[in-house]
Image (cartoon, rainbow, N blue to C red):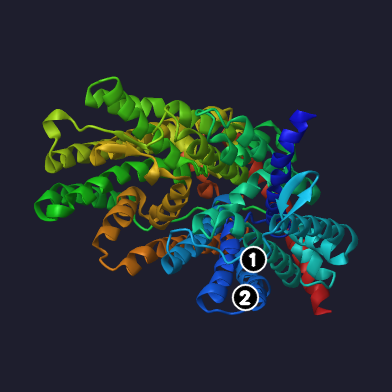
């Protein structure tokens, strides 16, 4: 009995917090079920409402009911209309395009809030009473109890809405076949808009309820949706009641973990990482058939790069020559350009994953962090030679990259992105602060090679690594493995049909990318003479993805340009306003690129090549000369097309005559 009484306070805290997580996750699942878009910007919408309330209540002195009404009632419809318009264009785009679009939107909102209100946490002007009441022998704040009741009422309302209302049925139908819904006399636009309106209302309410507990912190509120990932996974991204139960489960497990690991230094990061443990476990253990993605998806259409291969090579050579002249003109800015050379490696390794193989990985910053911390342990702790420590740092990152690849074997698309993002957050919250990586101080010493201690001499060392790493990625792209990777990005099923190992290919590309990222982390630490986890947060992975998308059309010149945008351009922006607005530009640009790619795919119809156009098959082209199996598949496809063509002509003629009558 005593043990139960000791656990009661943690259980009550877990239920009150988990209920809000469950409510936020239900709004996320609602919009996903009705639009087919998993909204990575869900937490950013919650942050918008919380900051609107703060601005009106604290800065402008409006009464709290007025500020609350504007933040929760007025703001969500405006955001909902924007989201509906964006997601309508993305409805049948590739999964990578959908992820990039919503991640870009999240970056725009978050960066704009940081630019306007700063990155430091602010005191949130609460409007609920903070007195305590006794519930089953535990003192609970009235504000916490009210939040739990509101969340529970919202969950019950969701369940009744989808079960009993005709609009709930229409919302489920709109994602399956919007055209059929239109034929029944119901506007798909109106249904989707109402779904987004409800989802944005839920996000706004979640932000307002959690802000008094978390503080008015942009990143914490933006990552609210990450807390909801685990709850949504428990509900298999479809069941609203199970999603709410998942929120309660995560809240309770996090609260109990706080008690159980209170005396353990190694496990001190487990409580905040509990949502990601649940997310990763569900995605790995649940049957693959139960994680079907919602909505239509088109294969990636063949996209014409902005430059030809020859031009890309010329630009790359010119970039190397210009980089060799940088020490002559950079002066005090030389360390900035040294960091840019490290970012060339980071973006080259990420491009191999995202653009070449089509794997959406959001844990890349964690791989770089592993390389940075490992280098310090090897070079300083173990006293290994500098070059050996750098290379071994890349080797140590390979098993971590293969761990990231485990979800890629079972999952793809959205669920792979969620799994990798969850794993990156798990490493950040639970492992970064341990002695395995950066320790309590979050900073470790990192040396430079003895003969290249100076900034200028070490710059050329970094330039040599950047060129070597870029050549390695280029050779992989031009090899048979590169052709397999591009074919896998087009159609993994076709690759398996030809008797080629898709899983081995996936693990291999993650291993190569992790090695280059680990080496980049070691060089980053050596350049700054210290290894720290601060630059390699999970949010950084989202920023890198958006910048890479902006520059990917430049082929081999994409990573150097991305490195310049991330490392060099901010150093020359003397105005803090412009420097803070730069991530907004990155996010907005990535959103526009994603919308353009989605529109191009839509204009091509299915986005797939015509069945009677053998030259349009990118899988055949990327695999090289087609083998016997490929030739038989092509011949069968042509024969089937020839048989069905007259039927299509007759049907089309019949429809034309009927329309004429």
Q: In this figure, which residue is indicated by the disc labeled 1?
A: 88
Q: In this figure, which residue is indicated by the disc labeled 2?
A: 67
Residue furthest left as drawn: 328
Instruction: Verify CB contact (< 8 Å) between mark 1 and mark 2.
Output: no
Residue 396 x, y percent position in the rendering: 40, 25
Judge whether residue 243 can be spotted in this image. Answer: no
Compare residues 384 and 606 and report the one nearer the observer.
384
Compare residues 78 and 402 and report the one nearer the observer.
78
Q: Is residue 31 left or right of residue 611?
A: right
Q: Residues within 10 Å of mark 2 (few under 14, many from 20)?
A: many
Image: 150 above or below 241: below
SS of the residue under disc 1: helix
Residue 287 x, y percent position in the rendering: 73, 33
Residue displayed at 65% across by 33% down: 281
Residue displayed at 27% across by 25% down: 380
Quarter holding residue 474: top left
Image: 408 above or below 44: above
Badge number at residue 353: none
Q: Is residue 480 left or right of residue 312?
A: right
Residue 197 x, y percent position in the rendering: 70, 68
Q: Is residue 621 left or right of residue 248?
A: left
């Amino acid at each position: 009995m005593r043990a139960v009484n000791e656990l009661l306070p943690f259980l009550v805290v877990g239920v009150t917090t988990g209920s809000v997580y469950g409510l936020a996750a239900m709004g996320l699942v609602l919009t996903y079920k009705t639009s087919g878009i998993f909204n990575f910007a869900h937490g950013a919408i919650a942050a918008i409402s919380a900051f609107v309330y703060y601005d009106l209540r604290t800065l402008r002195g409006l009464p709290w009911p007025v500020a609350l009404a504007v933040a929760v009632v007025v703001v969500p419809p405006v955001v909902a209309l924007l989201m509906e318009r964006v997601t309508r264009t993305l409805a049948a785009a590739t999964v990578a395009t959908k992820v990039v679009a919503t991640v870009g939107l999240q970056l725009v909102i978050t960066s704009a809030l940081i630019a306007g209100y700063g990155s430091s946490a602010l005191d949130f002007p609460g409007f609920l009473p903070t007195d305590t009441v006794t519930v089953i022998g535990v003192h609970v704040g009235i504000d916490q109890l009210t939040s739990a009741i509101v969340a529970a009422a919202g969950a019950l309302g969701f369940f009744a809405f989808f079960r009993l209302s005709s609009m709930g049925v229409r919302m489920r139908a709109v994602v399956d076949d919007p055209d059929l819904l239109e034929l029944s006399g119901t506007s798909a636009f109106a249904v989707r808009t109402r779904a987004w309106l409800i989802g944005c209302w839920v996000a706004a309410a979640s932000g307002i309820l959690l802000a008094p507990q978390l503080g008015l912190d942009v990143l914490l509120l933006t990552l609210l949706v990450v807390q909801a990932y685990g709850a949504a996974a428990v509900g298999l991204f479809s069941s609203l009641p199970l999603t709410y139960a998942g929120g309660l489960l995560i809240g309770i497990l996090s609260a109990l973990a706080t008690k159980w690991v209170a005396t353990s230094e190694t496990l001190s990061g487990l409580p905040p990482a509990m949502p990601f443990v649940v997310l990763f476990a569900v995605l790995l253990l649940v049957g693959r058939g139960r994680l079907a993605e919602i909505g239509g998806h088109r294969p990636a259409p063949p996209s014409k790069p902005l430059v030809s291969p020859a031009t890309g090579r010329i630009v790359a050579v010119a970039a190397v020559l210009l980089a060799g002249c940088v020490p002559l003109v950079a002066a005090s800015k030389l360390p900035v350009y040294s960091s840019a050379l490290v970012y060339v490696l980071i973006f080259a390794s990420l491009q191999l994953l995202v653009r070449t193989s089509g794997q959406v990985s959001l844990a890349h910053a964690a791989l770089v962090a592993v390389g940075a911390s490992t280098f310090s342990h090897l070079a300083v702790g173990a006293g290994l030679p500098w070059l050996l420590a750098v290379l071994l740092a890349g080797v140590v990152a390979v098993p971590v990259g293969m761990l990231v690849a485990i979800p890629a074997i079972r999952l793809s698309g959205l669920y792979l992105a969620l799994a990798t993002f969850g794993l990156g957050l798990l490493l950040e919250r639970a492992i970064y602060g341990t002695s395995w990586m950066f320790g309590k101080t979050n900073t470790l010493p990192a040396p430079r090679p003895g003969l290249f201690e100076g900034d200028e001499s070490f710059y050329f060392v970094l330039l040599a690594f950047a060129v070597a790493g870029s050549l390695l990625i280029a050779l992989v792209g031009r090899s048979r493995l590169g052709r397999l990777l591009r074919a896998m990005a087009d159609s993994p099923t076709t690759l398996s049909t030809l008797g080629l190992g898709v899983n081995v290919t996936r693990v291999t590309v993650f291993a190569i990318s992790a090695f280059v990222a680990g080496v980049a982390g070691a060089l980053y630490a050596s350049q700054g003479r210290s290894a720290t986890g601060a630059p390699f947060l999970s949010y950084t992975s989202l920023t890198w993805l958006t910048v890479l998308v902006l520059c990917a059309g430049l082929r081999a010149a994409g990573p150097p340009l991305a490195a310049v945008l991330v490392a060099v351009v901010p150093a020359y922006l003397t105005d803090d306003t412009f420097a803070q607005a730069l991530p907004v530009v990155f996010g907005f640009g990535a959103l526009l690129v994603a919308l353009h790619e989605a529109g191009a795919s839509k204009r091509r119809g299915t986005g797939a090549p015509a069945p009677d156009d053998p030259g349009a098959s990118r899988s055949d082209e990327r695999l090289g000369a087609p083998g016997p199996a490929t030739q038989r598949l092509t011949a069968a496809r042509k024969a089937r097309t020839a048989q069905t063509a007259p039927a299509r002509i007759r049907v089309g003629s019949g429809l034309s005559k009927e329309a004429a009558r």
